[in-house]
Structure formats: structure tokens, C-alpha cells
Image (tube, rainbow, N blue to C red):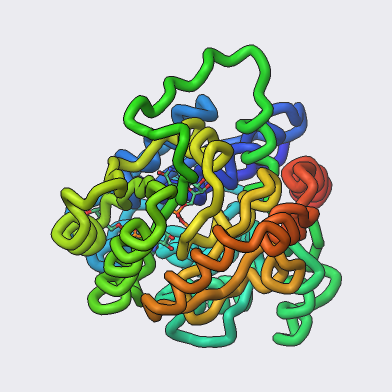
Amino acid sequence: MSRILVTFGTRPEAIKLAPLIIQLKKEKSVNLTVCTTGQHRHMLDQAMKVFGIKPDFDMNIMIKDQTIEQVISMVLINIGRIFDIVKPDIVVVQGDTTTAFAISMAAFLRKIKIAHVEAGLRSHDKYKPFPEEANRRMISHIADLHFAPTKKAAMNLTNENIDKKTIFVTGNTGVDALIMTAYRRGKAPIEPLHFLDKKKKLILVTAHRRESFGKPLRDICKALKRIVYICPDVEVLYPVHLNPSVKKTVYRIIKGADRIHLIEPLSYEKFVHVMKLSHLILTDSGGIQEEAPSLKKPVLVMREVTEREEGIAAGCSRLVGLDPASIVRNVVALLDNKKLYSKMANVKNPYGDGKASKRIARILKKIASR
Ligand code: UD1
Ligand code: UDP
């Protein structure tokens, strides 16, 4: 039996690896172990609960306001013992977080095969997003299998001289998670958010990128206040990320503003539900850029660069930067221009078809048994 160790630590990694874990559990020839670093706690637990994931190992490393160095050190200190117990043939990492980077580094040092899910995303700017662009570049150069979500991502890898034979274009597993959750049958209905006014257009907001801490995040908050001021028919729902650097700024500037609801992070199920209810989404998140087209929701990306260029090219998302005037202008344009709205909303999702995890599981099973 081949031993596969799937690892993750943050909310988006758990969401995007959940469909793969579910697939791998079905494979009789695979001995699957699930390990979390606990880089996130509450937000990770929320995501694991939705998919019924119970990790075999949980390093539980999160501390308040942790530094990246602390996370890397804690992962490196803990993972060796887990490698000793599990003796994996392949270690699976996802994306570009500190967890993914630290686990890859540890696996490389043990000469254990690394499979990288969501490989090849590039903004081509070392500091944007920070530290994710550097993390994913470094992972690519020590990984053995690269599961690229799109052809563009695969091309980014071949441009960096990664061996073509090790790259597989699979789609993004985040789209699998979205489809599984958005159209799940037989589930109890989601409790409505009673404070939302059904007569208003809902703008859903998230923002948490480290390179936006300080002035850019303050500017985002000012833009939100301006939007509700000049658009009386909208309301904003903003589930605020638990990072204290985000929370403090957002609550200080926005708390008490009319028609802006600041709330705790929502469980993935509830978040998918509010994406469905929303008119448009304003975000700096990577995952949300990939999910929204499947729900026909236009996305305005509050970043200077994005590695998710497929959505921009296809027309379902727009890069609006961090200048408050540009954020406001783009929101107003989308609210006012029905033709533009419909064009952005009706684009086939360029990030996946919901079958990525099946493809990845099939390849992993084959390679692990060699
Ligand atoms: C991390 C990832 C980022 C990803 C984001 C997803 C890195 C460097 N960054 O950023 O790529 O987009 O997760 O959300 O890996 N906290 C809690 N409870 C939680 C989660 C976080 O209190 O459930 C607070 C803690 O004080 C923690 C802080 O947020 O120290 C920062 O968490 P961390 O994982 O270091 O960074 P993120 O900004 O969440
Ligand atoms: N998400 C969630 N609850 C929230 C906000 C987001 O479950 O309150 C989900 C969202 O649907 C997406 C993922 O979390 O699947 C994105 O995570 P995040 O924005 O933290 O990280 P990123 O994608 O930017 O790395």
C-alpha cells in the first residue's frame, strides 16, 4: 500500500484539499494520513468541520499575531516526528502558505517526494503577494509533482525549466469544493443572516493580504464607506479575517458605519451561501477569485497584481488596485452598467470544472504505487 501524507494549515488549504482527501479515502491501494499544522485555528476548524475532516495529526501551532519565522520554526520542529511515524511515499502540499513552504522544505530534506497542488501560479512580483509569491516559486523548485490548475500555470512552470513530464493540468480543487458545497443535496438549509436587507444589493467584501497592511487596508475601508455613502441601494457584508493586523484597522475605521456589516469569518458553507446572495464581490483573496465565476458573481480584485490572470482575461474579474477612487469608480460602474455586469457574470469558470481532485487522486495513486 502506498502511503500518502496530505498536509495543510490554513482555511484555504483545508477547503482546497478537502475534495482530494475525500477522493483519496476512496482509494483502497492508498494508506492516507492527514496532518494539519494548525497555522490557523478557528478558521481552519470551521473549514474542516464543513467537510468532516478529522486530522490524524494536529501540530496546533497557532499563536496570536504570529510571525512567519515562528510558523516556519514550529512546523519544522514538529514535522520530523510525523515523518518518522508515517514514513510517507508522497507528501502533498497545497498553494503558497508558510505551512506549504515549511512542509515542502522538510520533505525535501528527507528526500520524500513532494506533490504540489495548485502549482505554477505567478504574479511575477517577488513581494506581491507577500510572502506567497516567493513561497510558491521555492516550492516549485523542490517539488516532484506539479498539479497546475490551468494551462497558463503549467506554462509558468515550463518557463522556469520544470520538467514537463512532472506537470499535470488538472483544474483547481477549489472549484471542486465550491461545487460540492453550493449544490449539496439533503443538507439542512443555511440559517439566513437576518440583518440583511433583501431590497438592497449586497456587496460581499474580504481583505487580508499582508502587503495591504497599513495604508492600503485603510484605503480599502475608506472606499467601502464612500461606496455606501454614494450608493443608497447597496449594503456591504464584510466577514473580517481574524489576523489582528486586519481586525484592528477594519473595526477602527468602519465600526458603526451605516449599511456596512462587519462580522466574524463565516463557515465555508455560509460563505458560499452569501456569495450566492451577493450582487458583486470585492476582495483580495486568491480562492474567491476562483470560486465566484461558478456562481456568476463578478469580482473586483483589490490588489495591484494578481496571479489569477485567467479570470481577468476571461472577463469575470477586474483588477481595480488599492486606490480608493478606483475601487469606488469600478463598483459604481458595475452597479450602473447592466451590460457590463451581465458580461462579467456570464463567463465560464476558467479555473476548473469540478473534477480536479479526481484527476489528482488518480495520478497520485499511480505514481505512489511505483
Ligand atoms: C495566511 C497565509 C495566506 C493565506 C491566509 C488565508 C501565510 C504567510 N499566509 O495568512 O497566504 O491567504 O492565511 O486566510 O502563510 N488568526 C486567528 N485565528 C485563526 C486564524 C488566524 O486568531 O483562525 C490570527 C492569529 O493571531 C494569527 C494571525 O491571525 O497569528 C495570522 O495568521 P497567519 O496564518 O500567520 O497569517 P494569515 O494572515 O492568516
Ligand atoms: N471563506 C470562508 N469564510 C469567510 C471568508 C472566506 O469560508 O468568511 C472561504 C472562501 O470561500 C475561500 C477561502 O475561504 O474558499 C479563501 O480564504 P482566504 O481568503 O482566507 O485565503 P486566500 O484564498 O486569499 O489564500
In the figure, is residue 86 to the left or right of 229? right
User: Residue shown at 72%/67% (left/top)?
Assistant: 315
User: Does residue 232 appear in this view?
Assistant: yes
In x, y percent, where is residue 259?
Answer: 30, 46
Q: Is residue 347 above or below residue 222?
A: above
In the figure, is residue 38 to the left or right of 187? left
User: Residue shown at 55%/47% (left/top)?
Assistant: 279
In the figure, is residue 216 to the left or right of 365? left
In x, y percent, where is residue 26?
Answer: 73, 27
Pick the front one: 204 or 214: 204
- Image quadrant holding the N terminus, namely top right
Q: Give the quarter of the image for residue 228.
A: bottom left
Q: Give the quarter of the image for residue 248.
A: bottom left
Q: Is residue 134 above or below residue 334?
A: below
Pick the front one: 244 or 228: 228
User: Residue shown at 63%/71% (left/top)?
Assistant: 121
User: Residue shown at 77%/64% (left/top)?
Assistant: 150
